[in-house]
Image: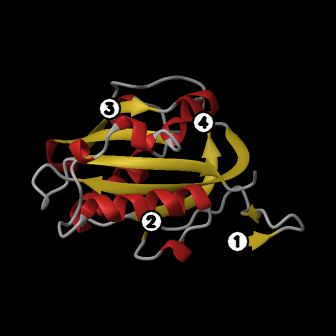
């Protein structure tokens, strides 16, 4: 990862960072994701993670086009994408709301994406991934993106849903 003359983050298209645990905002690049992380922390309180019902849709409006809400299925063997924001749909090239990860072509990356979700769910902690952005046909966009994956919990202890924010790094 490096900065170009405009201070945009530049990753080579094939570079992807590991799914890394996030404990502080300075571990994130995009200011929108830093704000989303702080908002998630406020909603968490003394639990491991907040519930989906702790969030009112109007509170999420600043991030809504960039958000995906997923249900964790079958003890983590799959996720169902309940909500996919308009920005994500526009750049991915189609709306896969209602589909599971196993039903979607992620350019051969389905297993890796499920593994990222499983890490977040098992650790009950926010994680970030930075790397190339691919459309639904598996074609690389040649822009890098940062994803923040946040666990949500119905009981405050186990992950039931995942909230993911995604933004291009090179604006």
Q: Where residue 138 is drawn, which disc sits there? A: 4
Chain-order first, disc 3 or disc 4:
3
- The x and y percentages for residue 99 are 34, 26
Q: Where on the picture, by quarter, is residue 60?
A: top left
User: Which residue position is annotated with label 3?
Assistant: 100
Q: Which residue is at a point 60% across and 36% down the rendered structure image?
A: 138
Q: Distance between the residues labelled 4 and 2?
A: 20 Å
Label 2, label 3: how many angstroms apart (C-alpha)?
20 Å
Is there a contact, CB below 8 Å, between mark 2 and mark 1? no
- Note whether residue 77 is visible: no
Is 68 left or right of 66, judged from the image as shown? left
Q: Which of 2 and 65 is in front in this view?
A: 65
If the image is split into quadrants, where does the N terminus sit? bottom right
Mark earlier in primary sequence (4, 1): 1
Left or right: where 88 falls relative to 99: right
Q: Is mark 2 on a helix, strand or loop?
A: loop
Q: Name the residue under label 2.
A: 19
């Amino acid at each position: 990862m490096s900065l170009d003359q405009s201070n945009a983050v530049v990753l080579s298209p094939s570079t992807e960072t590991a799914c890394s645990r996030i404990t502080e905002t300075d571990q994130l690049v995009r200011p929108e994701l830093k704000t989303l992380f702080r908002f998630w922390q406020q909603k968490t309180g003394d639990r491991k993670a907040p519930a989906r019902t702790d969030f009112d849709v109007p509170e999420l409006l600043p991030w809504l086009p960039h958000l995906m809400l997923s249900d964790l299925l079958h003890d983590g063997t799959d996720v169902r994408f309940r909500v996919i924001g308009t920005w994500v749909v526009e750049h991915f090239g189609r709306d896969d709301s209602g589909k599971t990860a196993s039903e979607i072509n992620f350019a051969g990356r389905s297993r890796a994406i499920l593994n990222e979700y499983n890490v977040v769910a098992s650790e009950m902690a926010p994680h970030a991934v930075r790397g190339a952005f691919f459309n639904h046909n598996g074609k690389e966009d040649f822009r890098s993106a940062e994803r923040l994956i946040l666990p949500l919990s119905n009981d405050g202890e186990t992950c039931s849903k995942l909230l993911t924010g995604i933004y291009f790094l090179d604006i």
